[in-house]
Amino acid sequence: MSETCVSQFMCSTHAPLWLNGAHPNIGDGEVTRNVCGHWENNCCRFPSNPIKVKACPGGYYVYAFVQPNYCSGTYCAVTSINNAPESTLGAPTIFYPFGSAAGDTNNPVLEDGSSPVIQLSSSFLFFGRSYQNIYVNNNGYLTFNQASSEYVPYSFPANRSQDIIAGLWTDLDNRVKGVVSYQQYINGSLLTNATRDIKTYFPDLNFNASWVFVATWDKVAYFPVTNTNTSFQMVLISGRNISFILMNYGDIAVTEHPVQAGYDTISSTNYFVIPGSKLGSFISNLRSSSNVGVPGRWVFRVDSGKNNIVGLKAKLTSFSDLTDNGNIQMVLDQLKQVLVRNGVSNSIELKLRKVQKIKP
């Protein structure tokens, strides 16, 4: 269900019901949440009976619905507005609110176009550089210093002179199908949700989100194949000079175009390529891959260019025979993903110096 007010007459009813409160974390168990119906420009004109909500592993929720206390009440998961494709109908539960219902600004409908310069309400720290502006480029990536019309991605690390965040950089076309939109937040339940997510993935970090920027590509086609649908989202989160990127993936159509997903910094001092994102024939797997155990979501801490980790303790949840070279590389790759997620440069190399086999 939506945590933000849903427009009147959505979900085939007069006053649609939405969740007036944040969704729980997995550790919260079953919780009670209030429900509101939007009518006469009052988002909670019709308070309804509370419902039970539970978060489940895998990034989804279970709701125990009860009968609404007014005749035109219908539970709503945010529907389309005038049949526009920028709705969250059918969007993965990992997506943050987007589209007209969330108050997004749409990008120009233009081949290889970009947003105008977007003044950020709060500076965003990206590997030691602080930015006050951002551009949302139609071809699936964010830049800070200037807009970009490049539709053929260069491979990371590129050792270029710009910082770039690529949700799915390829030749996308919003002229016939799909919407590219964005919104930034400095208050409200979305900041609560962002704080919850970051604390889930970084439980030892004292963090509270004060600013969130959401850019969404909803059912956008590839050029020139207009019958393809590709949906993904980039979420920038910051608070107290700590910053993160969330990349959320929905349905991703395969393509013959060159593709690239991840990030790269000036001179490639920090970079990351999401595994499997370099081949257009495999990128549909992005919906099921993750570095945080939530299918379709990748999360990175990106505020510092310094590697401040002085020690590492790891707990393996299954047995691996580390006398096998294949198992060694698999374990090291998994450890590297954890380190990169916490802000360490992707160029770090991990080597196993010694293997000692002991009885359990």
Image (cartoon, rainbow, N blue to C red):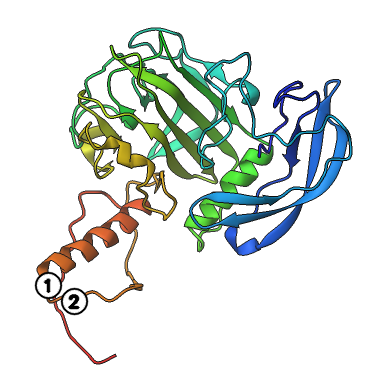
User: Is residue 333 at all visible to an observer of this figure?
Assistant: yes
Residue 322, percent from left and from top: 17, 75
Q: How busy is the neighbourhood of tag 1: few (under 14 within 10 Å), some, or many (20 plus)?
A: few
Label 1 close to label 2 by CB (< 8 Å): yes
- Residue 30: which quarter of the image? bottom right
Task: Residue under label 2, please give it.
Answer: 321
Pick the quarter of the image with the N terminus.
top right
Q: Secondary structure at mark 1?
A: loop
Q: Is residue 338 above or below residue 208?
A: below
| Quadrant into which the C terminus falls | bottom left
Label 2 sits on a secondary structure element that is: loop
Q: Residue at x 56, y 53 (%)?
A: 207
Q: Residue sitting at 65 percent across and 49 percent down? A: 23
Residue tagged by mark 1?
Answer: 324
Residue 343 in sight from this viewpoint:
no
Q: Residue at x 56, y 29 (%)?
A: 88
Return the residue nearer the eye: 76 or 204: 76
Where's residue 319, x and y in %?
Answer: 27, 76
Q: Quadrant of residue 130?
A: top left
Amino acid type at mark 1: Asp
Amino acid tagged 2: Asp
